[in-house]
Each structure stands twice: as structure tokens, then as C-alpha cells.
Amino acid sequence: MTDAELTARLRANLLTFRLLQARQGRLRMRELPGVRAFALPELGGNLFQQQILYEEARALAGALEPLEAWYHELGVRTWRVPVYPGDATAEAVLTRAGYRPGDCLPAMGLALAHPPPQLPAGLTLEHPDDLDAVLTLNALFYGQDSVAHLETWRTPPLPSAQVHVVLVREAGRALAGGVCVEQGDTAGIYLVATHPGARRRGLGALVMQALHADALARGRTVAVLQASPMGHPLYQRLGYRDLGGWTSWVR
């Protein structure tokens, strides 16, 4: 599968995840032809939540002005547009509109062929029907603002049959977890985190291997994700290949 095909699957999967957030939680959404914008006004400075996803640059160009008005109505003063690798047309559109490039997150993809992980003694692998423990781990590692938009997902059941959770415990204590959002043949990986006191034990790799094996058993053939700087080396070791960086253009 080409990098462009994997990038398209990541874009579609990320949109599915955002739509679930908007339907089941506090995330706001505005839809225009070929474009969807998301906002969490109470976290106005959190650029991860204030973002515009587009299908092609032409659609983006026509949507920027009404979306600027929408963000201002919500009291959001800063937002971002993730631009896909090599999309010079979108970059030109955003430059003319006063946007400037900011942070860049690597996109990554993997053909699934992973057997179930071998758990060390004393560890258990669970598949809870809520995100409570995984959200707690993410809040410990990345801060509470990183999961505020998903607080309504703490109570079971999960908002969709497409959402699957893996959790590693030791003596009843949650140490690592992650989430898979499935669409078509693709598994999107999100919210992978390890308890700060349990790092460097290979637990993140165990979670990833379990997510991969479960998705493969359900008929998915590829996995996609956006990597944090800390997670990028782990994903490379697991066989993910880089698809290019998604640059956040900020208004």
C-alpha cells in the first residue's frame, strides 16, 4: 500500500474519531462542503481540539472565511489546519489567508501481521467497555486538558462498536493502555499512554501489539496513527513507516 493510500486512510479514520467525539461528548462541529471544523470553546488555547479537517484545498479555500466567523462566535481565538504531506496548494491557500506553519506531527502506517503479545508474569491484558482507566493514564502523562473532550466516555458502554480498548494491569493497577478506532480495513491507534511510574518496561509495546492482534482478528489489514515525539521511536521499532509530517497551520 502506498504512502498516499495510508495517508488517506489516516485522514478518514481521524475524521471518524472526531465525529464520534462530537456526537458523544462536548466537542462542537461545523460542516461545510468538503470540510469539517471542530471546537472545544472551554479549552480555547488547546490547539489539538480547535482544528479544521479538509478533503482538498479547493474546499478549504471556500470554507476559511465562514469558519473564522464560527470560531469567533464560540470565543475561540486560535485554531489550526493540519496540512497533509506535499499539499502545496493548501499551504498557498492558508498563507494568503494569514495562517502560519507551526508544529509538525509524523503520520505513520503499518501492514498488520502481528501475533498476540506474550505477557510477562504478573501482568494481565483486559478489554474494558469504557475509557476510564485509559483516560486516567493519559491525564497523568499528558495533562488533564488532553482528555477533557472525552470525559463522557468514562461511563460504559463505549460510543461505538468501532472503538476498542486495551489495558495492561499489574496487581489490579492500570499501567498502560490504548484505543483502536476501526473503519473499513483500517485500525486507527489513539490514546496510547503508560503510567509515569511504569515507563521503560516495554508496556507501550505490549499495548500496541495487543491492539494490532485484535484488529487483525477482526479483519483489519492496516494500522495508522499520528506519533508524538516520545512515541515515534517505539512505533518505528514495531515496523511502522513514516508517511510524512502533518504540519499545523495556525490562525
Image: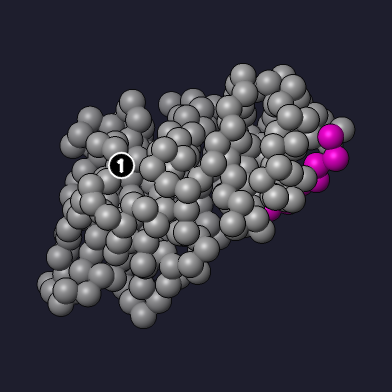
Identified at 33% across, 45% down, the residue is: 180
Question: Can you see residue 250?
Answer: no
- Would residue 101 be counted in the magenta stretch? yes
- Would residue 176 be counted in the magenta stretch? no
Q: Which one is in front, 219 or 74?
A: 74
Mark 1 lies on residue: 159
Identified at 73% across, 29% down, the residue is: 66
Q: Amino acid at mark 1?
A: Pro
Question: Above or below — where is 203 with respect to 156?
Answer: below
State which quadrant residue 195 falls in. bottom left
Q: Which one is in front, 192 or 38?
A: 38
Question: Above or below — where is 46 with respect to 86?
Answer: below
Question: Can you see residue 185?
Answer: yes
- Classify residue 242 as left or right of residue 186: right
* Residue bounds of the magenta highlight: 97-103
Question: Above or below — where is 220 with respect to 114?
Answer: above
Residue 49 percent location from the top left of the image: 57, 49
- Label 1 SS: loop
Q: How many marks?
A: 1
Residue 211 percent location from the top left of the image: 27, 48
State which quadrant residue 174 falls in. bottom left
- Classify residue 9 as left or right of residue 66: left
Can you say which quadrant of the picture contains the C terminus?
Answer: top right
Outermost residue on the front side: it is 73
Outermost residue on the left side: it is 121
Outermost residue on the bottom side: it is 197
Residue 173 percent location from the top left of the image: 22, 74
Q: Which one is in front, 182 or 210?
A: 182
- Classify residue 208 as left or right of residue 236: left
Residue 129 percent location from the top left of the image: 21, 51
